Every structure is written in C-alpha cells, then in structure tokens.
Amino acid sequence: MDNEFIIVVIYNSHAVSWECISKDASISDFKNLLLTKYVLPEKMMIEIDDVYVPISDHISLLNMMGDVKCLQVRVSTQPRITNLVLRK
C-alpha cells in the first residue's frame, strides 16, 4: 500500500467507487483501469480539483495530488451512466 494511493471516483454524479492505483500511474493508466474493471463508454472526461484533465496526456496522478493521501476524481461519460457494472 506504500506504493499506492486511493482515488474516490464519482461517475456522472450517480455512482461512486474507490480505486487503489500505483503512485507511478498516469491519467491514461487510470482511464485504462476503469475501462478494464467496469463496463463504461470509451468517451469520458476526467475532472480533478475542478480542472478537466486531458486523458491523452501522460500526466502523473501523483503530481495532481499535492499533499493529500486520497484524490477525488469526477468522471463524465458519454453516454451517461447511472450505475456501475463490473466486467466479467
């Protein structure tokens, strides 16, 4: 757990999940984690601290955190989802 941190993910203001991810992960890695774990549309926007972050960039999530141990991320999908479905 020392090499990981927790992200609270809010999807379209309807669903919430808690994810553990490596401190070395990028925004792109985070999106891939979500798409691998849940049935989600490919088309999504990620918002961290009221800033929409380009997914194509390899921005480190650790750089977005500052001094906190937990990060809140809002994910907006198109089409919108109202619940999370795990992949089988």
Image (cartoon, rainbow, N blue to C red):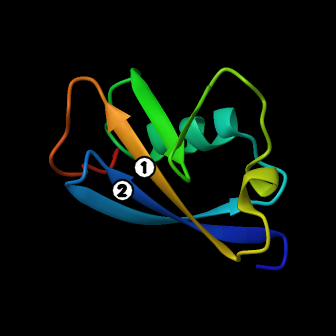
Badge 1: residue crowd in 10 Å (few <14, some 14–19, many ≥20): many
Residue annotated with mark 1: 74
50 left or right, relative to 61? left
User: Mark 2 and mark 1: span between their CA atoms?
Assistant: 5 Å
Residue ID at (58%, 35%): 32
The answer to whether mark 2 and mark 1 are in CB contact below 8 A is yes
Q: Is residue 50 above or below residue 78?
A: below
Residue ID at (34%, 36%): 76
Callout 2 amino acid = Ile
Q: Earlier in the sequence, mark 2 or mark 1?
A: 2
Badge 2: residue crowd in 10 Å (few <14, some 14–19, many ≥20): some
Callout 1 amino acid = Arg
Please state which of residues 57 and 84 is positioned toward the viewer in this rendering.
57
Residue 10, label in figure:
2
Residue 53 sits in quarter: top right
48 left or right, relative to 61? left
- Let me know if residue 36 appears in the view: no
Q: Secondary structure at mark 1?
A: strand
Residue ID at (62%, 26%): 54
Location of residue 73 in the rendering, given as x and y in whole percent from the top left corner: 50, 54
- Let me know if residue 46 appears in the view: yes
Location of residue 25 in the rendering, given as x and y in whole percent from the top left corner: 77, 48
